[in-house]
Structure formats: structure tokens, C-alpha cells
Image: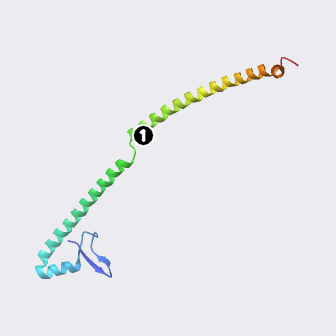
Amino acid sequence: MTIVKYEDDKIVEGAVMGYAIPLKIYEQLEEKLGKEAAGVITKALEESIKKAFEEAEERQQTVISENLKKELATKYDLALLKKDIEKLEIDLRKEIELVRKDMKIMTVIIVAVMVVLNQNSLEFIARLLGLLK
């Protein structure tokens, strides 16, 4: 049996807070029912309160756990995300390669148009390549 004595809203003696019956209540029970009955009732109340707290704590932990499961990504979710990223990377690399090929073709076309439209450019290209001095 745990009895708590309060002075100025502070616990002075007793055990675990929340599981103890205040001294005034115990004294009133002892006065009305006797020491033995007061002890039995106090112990039963403490055990009941303790059990209620434990059950409430378990329920709260379950609720928190369920909420976390809903919010956090699982290993399976991360694996799916990784596969999606890898697929996007492959697609992006293909697109980049296509753009590079297009740029090479455009460069050849621009050089060909310059040569056809400007006869002096042929001489300039020859000098760049070191064919003419």
C-alpha cells in the first residue's frame, strides 16, 4: 500500500505518482472502515489505477505505431521509388543521346549551308584545317 502525503501541492512521501492514494483519503477510510479494510481498499484502488494507466499507455502506443506506419515509407516503398528513379535515369540518358545526335546533324547542316551560300567560307575552312596556307 502506498500513501502519499501532500504539503503545498508537493508530494512529500509515497511511491509512484499516479498510483498512490492521498493520505487524507486513506485516513478517512481508516477512520470509517478500520485500518485493515482501508489498506485493502487502498491497495485495490492503486492496482486498478495502475492497470488503467498501463492499458491507456498500450492503447496510445498502438495508435502512435499505426499512425507512423501510415506516414513513414517502408522498404518496399523505397524499392519501388528506386526502380522508378532508375527507369527515369535510363529514359533521360536516351533523350540526351538523341539531342546530341540532333546537334551533330544540325552542325553538319549549318556548315553545309554556309559553304553553299558563301564561297569564301570554303577557303576559310581549308585554312582552318591546314590545307591552304
Image spot of residue 73 (x, y percent): 40, 44
The C terminus: image quadrant = top right
Q: Which residue is mark 1?
A: 78
Quarter of the image for the N terminus: give it. bottom left
At 40% from the left edge and 40% from the top edge, which residue is drawn? 77
Q: Residues within 10 Å of mark 1 (few under 14, many from 20)?
A: few
Q: Is 64 on the left-hand or right-hand side of 105?
A: left
Residue at horizontal 15 percent and vertical 74 percent from the top: 39
Q: Is residue 117 above or below residue 46?
A: above
Residue situated furthest front in the rendering: 117
User: Hey, which quadrant is residue 58 in on the image?
Assistant: bottom left
Q: Quadrant of residue 55?
A: bottom left
Q: Position of residue 90 (x, y in %)?
A: 52, 29
Q: Toward which corner of the image does residue 125 lie, by quadrant?
A: top right
Q: Is residue 74 above or below residue 87?
A: below
Between 29 and 3, the residue placed more toward the observer is 29
